[in-house]
Image (spheres, rainbow, N blue to C red):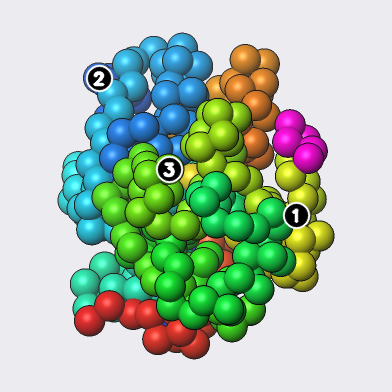
């Protein structure tokens, strides 16, 4: 990441860049479309639906959710980047849409740190490591030993190449020295379904995505890749407790607008999201799903994204994971 890119992202977040901006008499003056760049039914879709009612009350306009999966989230992201910068078309993007794709797909020449104005991170989703019950292991440590005894014979799914679940498993491989085959899908639901049917043996996702399958016995939750156990799932140990010290893998979902979107619109959207996250019903549901609420300022979001981008850049370089 260049210093120019870093400065541009911070300035956009803080509203400090002096640039021509379209005047907005009253924002919003029509429905707001939130593009989720993954298949319907995944965590991003779930989070957007969860906050949409409260946002509608704050903004006085309907929220229209448009799920556009494909290309590791690039298709939906580019659609938002090319939309009119008036605050009426937004992206609810995952970690990779902001700080991974520019490194995993370097030839696309698409840098989200300069193409979007950050609004806020909406939710942080600690990853749960799910296992197909057919695999004869009961803990993450046992899985690592089993994978080492069966190199290249086990596989894992992801919502697409370059997504956080993909790279988080690659980091697990780098930490433990195991060999796993990556099988990408188009979105979280088919990736989880592949685990359930036994087409793959491992998948990383939030608790809300796999909870029902664990409860029905169709999947096993080996560990949560977080610094602490999830309050609503106290029986699932952390990865560190399960034999892989220091392994943390969290996905997050953030709201962003096309670059040059007026600061007045950004401020109104940020206030609406914060109001939604403070709604008791939303807070309760996020906790139930194992999500941690966000709400930070645009500038804080920008700063955190810059720092994380460096981590993923180095992970991708070490694993030679960039796609030509």
Q: Which residues are magenta?
A: 231-235
Q: Which mark is residue 30?
A: 2
Q: Label 1 neighbourhood size at 10 Å, few (<14), some (14-19), many (20+)? A: many
Q: Residue at x 25, y 19 (%)?
A: 30
The dominant secondary structure in magenta is: loop
Q: Is residue 302 above or below residue 322?
A: above
Residue under label 3, please give it: 196
Q: Is residue 172 left or right of residue 181?
A: right
Q: Quadrant of the N terminus?
A: bottom left
Of 297 and 161, which appears nearest the observer?
Answer: 161
Q: Secondary structure at mark 1?
A: loop
Q: Which mark is residue 238?
A: 1
Q: Is residue 222 above or below residue 233?
A: below
Task: Please tell me which residue lies in front, 144 or 137.
Answer: 137
Instruction: Look at discs 3 and 2 and give the one toward the viewer.
Output: 3
Q: Is residue 57 within the magenta segment? A: no
> Of the residues under marks 3 and 2, which one precedes in the sequence?
2
Element type at mark 3 = helix
- Helix, strand or loop at mark 2: loop
Q: Position of residue 285 (x, y in %)?
A: 61, 22
Query: Going from the N terminus, do you reach mark 1 or mark 3 first?
Result: 3
Residue 141, quarter of the rendered image: bottom right
Above or below, 281 against 205 in this view is above
Residue 148 appearing in the image: yes
């Amino acid at each position: 990441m260049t210093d120019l890119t870093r400065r541009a992202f911070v300035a956009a977040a803080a509203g400090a860049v002096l640039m021509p901006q379209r005047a907005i008499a009253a924002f919003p003056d029509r429905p707001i479309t939130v593009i989720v760049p993954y298949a319907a039914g995944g965590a991003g879709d779930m989070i957007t639906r969860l906050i949409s009612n409260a946002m509608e009350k704050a903004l006085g306009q309907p929220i229209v959710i448009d799920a556009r999966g494909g290309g590791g989230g690039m298709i939906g992201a580019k659609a938002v980047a090319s939309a009119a910068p008036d605050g009426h078309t937004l992206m609810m993007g995952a970690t990779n849409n902001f700080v991974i794709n520019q490194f995993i797909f370097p030839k696309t020449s698409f840098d989200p740190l300069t193409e979007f104005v950050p609004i806020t991170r909406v939710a942080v989703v600690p990853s749960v490591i799910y296992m197909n019950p057919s695999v004869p292991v009961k803990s993450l440590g046992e899985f690592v030993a089993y994978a080492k005894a069966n190199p290249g014979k086990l596989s894992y799914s992801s919502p697409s190449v370059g997504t956080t679940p993909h790279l988080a498993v690659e980091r697990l491989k780098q930490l433990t020295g195991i060999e796993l085959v990556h099988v990408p899908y188009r979105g979280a639901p088919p990736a989880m379904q592949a685990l359930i049917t036994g087409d793959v043996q491992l998948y990383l996702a939030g608790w809300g995505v796999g909870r029902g399958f664990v409860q029905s016995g169709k999947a096993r939750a080996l560990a949560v890749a977080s610094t602490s156990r999830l309050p609503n799932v106290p029986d699932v140990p952390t990865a560190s407790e399960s034999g892989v010290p220091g392994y943390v893998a969290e996905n997050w979902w953030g709201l962003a607008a096309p670059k040059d979107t007026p600061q007045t619109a950004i401020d109104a959207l940020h206030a609406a999201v914060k109001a939604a996250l403070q709604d008791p019903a939303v807070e309760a549901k996020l906790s139930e799903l194992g999500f941690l609420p966000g709400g930070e300022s645009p500038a804080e979001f920008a700063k955190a994204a810059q720092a994380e981008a460096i981590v993923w850049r180095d992970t991708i370089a070490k694993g030679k994971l960039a796609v030509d």
